[in-house]
Image (cartoon, helix red, strand yellow):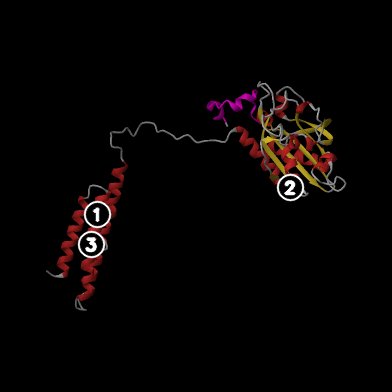
């Protein structure tokens, strides 16, 4: 039997084996037996060099044509078998409605926090974080909070039965102290985080909620810098129709201290003219002394507000507890 005759026999056997393969593994086995490294077709091709020089072109052309025919059938059979493997084993109604996989979303508080942080980042602020379990030094003492201040009472603060009179932080201002203790000025940070206070849960209060605070320390910082930053952030988060007003107030860690009221279409829709939204002020010189800054060289401002309040205004939510009940029907709206 000549090499061409053996080639035709091998091709016919390969085509028959591929056509009869019942599944992908059988198809791969048939492919290996025919054109694999040790397959019959490959072994015949190795004998091509033993032929007379004048016969090689014709036999080589026949080999290429046979191999191409095998590869065409192989590709066609593989597509058919893969489709068959994907079909359901049991009868299936392809006209029935499909089952869509639910797509997750960020919690509304996370969305609002991200928007606020994004607004600060555009103004050059970095994000800082700190522990939720704090000590009195960072949460009160370093912030110039007097020892008899109501906030330090067990009726307002969650104290932990542990050495050092630990507590759950009542504001994220403690992170400002930690940053200033470890970094020299200038500083420009924003501090989002969870805080805790001994409040009874109702429509506007919760024992745990979220705050975000900003701190800017540099030379020759003024109240004008504070107002400009506050207005830029609130207009980006709540819309360009926001109007702000600043009222004198008292905070132990700022001097002067200010309350911020705002109004826009959302507030007016609630039947109110102004709504208190944040507290702010110039950092008290005593706070700078507590962290080792010279108040004669450095000045700065800080302001903070509750994230839940912003979210309630943005989305028209009237009960703060809705954020924590994990009701999927409520969360799907966002």
Residue 151 screen position, x and y as percent? 76, 28
Q: Which residues are magenta?
A: 314-333
User: In which quarter of the view is residue 167 placed?
Assistant: top right
In the rendered image, the quadrant that contains the C terminus is top right
Residue at 16%, 69% (x, y): give it: 3
Is disc 1 placed on a helix, strand or loop? helix
Q: Residues within 10 Å of mark 2 (few under 14, many from 20)?
A: few
Q: Is residue 108 visible?
A: yes
Residue annotated with mark 1: 29
User: In the image, which disc is placed on residue 39?
Assistant: 3
Residue at 23%, 55% (x, y): give it: 30
Residue 223 screen position, x and y as percent? 83, 40
Pick whichever, 202 or 50, lies toward us: 202
Residue 312 screen position, x and y as percent? 66, 28
Residue at 78%, 26% (x, y): give it: 150
User: In which quarter of the view is residue 156 placed?
Assistant: top right
Q: Residue furthest bottom?
A: 53
Q: Is residue 20 above or below residue 244?
A: below
Counting residues from the N terminus, which is met first, the one under dot 1 or under dot 3?
1
Counting residues from the N terminus, which is met first, the one under dot 2 or under dot 1?
1
In the rendered image, the quadrant that contains the N terminus is bottom left
């Amino acid at each position: 039997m000549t090499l061409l005759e053996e080639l035709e026999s091998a091709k016919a056997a390969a085509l028959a084996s591929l056509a009869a393969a019942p599944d992908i593994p059988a198809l791969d086995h048939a492919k290996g037996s025919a054109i694999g490294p040790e397959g019959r077709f490959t072994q015949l091709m190795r004998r091509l060099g033993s032929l007379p020089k004048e016969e090689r072109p014709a036999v080589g052309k026949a080999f290429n044509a046979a191999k191409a025919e095998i590869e065409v059938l192989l590709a066609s059979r593989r597509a058919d078998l893969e489709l068959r493997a994907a079909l359901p084993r049991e009868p299936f109604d392809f006209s029935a409605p499909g089952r869509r996989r639910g797509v997750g979303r960020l919690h509304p508080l996370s969305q609002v926090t991200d928007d606020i942080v994004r607004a600060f980042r555009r103004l050059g602020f970095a994000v800082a974080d700190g522990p939720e379990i704090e000590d009195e030094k960072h949460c009160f003492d370093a912030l110039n909070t007097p020892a008899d201040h109501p906030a330090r009472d067990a009726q307002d603060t969650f104290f932990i039965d542990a050495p050092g009179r630990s507590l759950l932080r009542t504001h994220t201002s403690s992170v400002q102290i930690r940053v200033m203790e470890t970094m020299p000025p200038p500083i420009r940070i924003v501090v989002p985080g969870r805080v805790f206070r001994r409040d009874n849960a109702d429509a506007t209060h919760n024992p745990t909620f979220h705050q975000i605070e900003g701190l800017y320390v540099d030379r020759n910082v003024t109240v004008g810098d504070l107002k400009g930053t506050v207005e830029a952030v609130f207009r980006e988060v709540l819309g360009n129709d926001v109007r702000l007003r600043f009222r004198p107030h008292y905070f132990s860690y700022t001097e002067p201290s200010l309350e911020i009221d705002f109004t826009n279409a959302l507030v007016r829709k609630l039947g109110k003219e102004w709504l208190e939204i944040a507290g702010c002020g110039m950092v008290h010189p005593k706070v700078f002394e507590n962290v080792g800054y010279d108040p004669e060289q450095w000045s700065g401002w800080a302001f903070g507000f509750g994230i839940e309040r912003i979210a309630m205004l943005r989305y028209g939510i009237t009960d703060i507890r809705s954020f924590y009940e994990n009701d999927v029907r409520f969360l799907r709206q966002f």
